[in-house]
Image: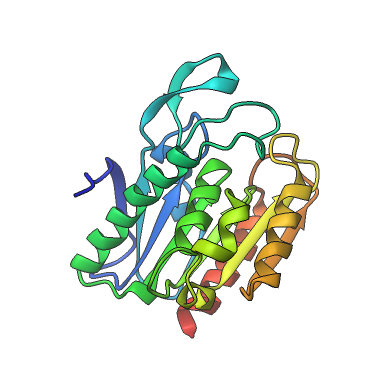
Amino acid sequence: MTAILSHITMDTGKNPQHSIIWLHGLGADGQDFVPIVEEIHLPVAMRYIFPHAPHRPVTINGGFVMRAWYDIASDDIGARQDAEGVRVSQTQIEALIAQEVARGIKPDNIFLAGFSQGGAVALHTAIRQNIKLAGVLVLSAYLPLADKLNSEATRIAQQTPIFMAHGLNDPIVPCTMGIASRDALLVAGYTVAWQDYPMQHTVNEQELHDIQHWLSQQIKK
């Protein structure tokens, strides 16, 4: 049984029936996106879960130990991908999904979200579920292990809507990687909403507005 990652939990109302598991980027921690709870206003009470990635050495940073969902070997983040690390993180996020289900949250009321590395893991995990989730937010990220999409993604996961957002001037995860991931998902039959912004590797006010709108749409369905 996979141990539950340490995490921050914040409820926006009593007895929330919707949850969103939000994964931070490389070198950050669960606290990184806590401020968005006050910035995103949704029509229902929401439980936000912000897990802390485990500490691990990261090759691109000289082996320095930091919080990371998987290792990155070089500036070309699409090459020499850490498949084992991605899959371990998948099981850890699945344990958080199972925790929410055990609390009485329906799977199709559970969102996954993530920024950068966290977005990659959120997307990787969502498309491998045997249940339909409420949706997945993929922010300044990409589809890892894209060559496994057709062989590992489940048919039911095609029903999980995807929102992808990216900075046009992103120097860390090039926007072209996000676009290529979006196109691969569309070809595979997924529903993908795409937004890009004149920014770098960050989140801006317009993006938060678009996230709020998209989440509200999914909740009302």
Of 60 and 80, nearer the camera is 80
| Camera-side residue of 198 and 24 | 24
Is residue 179 rendered to the left or right of residue 122? right
Residue lying at the far front of the rendered structure: 151
| Residue at the image point whose x is 75% and y is 35% from the top | 171
* For residue 19, side relative to residue 137 (left or right): left
Residue extending furthest bottom? 221
- In this rendering, the count of numbered labels is 0
Using the rendered view, name the quadrant where residue 21 is placed. bottom left
Give x and y (percent) for residue 195: 72, 61
Q: Is residue 70 left or right of residue 107?
A: right
Residue at 31% x, 53% y: name it: 10
Position of residue 181 in the picture relative to residue 56 (left or right) = right
Residue at (19%, 49%) from the top-left corner?
Answer: 1
| x then y, percent, for residue 8 | 31, 45
Question: In the image, residue 80 lies at what x, y percent?
Answer: 61, 34
In the rendered view, tell whether residue 91 sits above or below residue 186. Answer: above
Closest to the observer, 199 or 188: 188
What percent of the width, then of the height, locates residue 12?
34, 62
Q: Which residue is drawn at the image coordinates 29% and 69% (left, top)?
A: 16
124 relative to 24, above or below: below
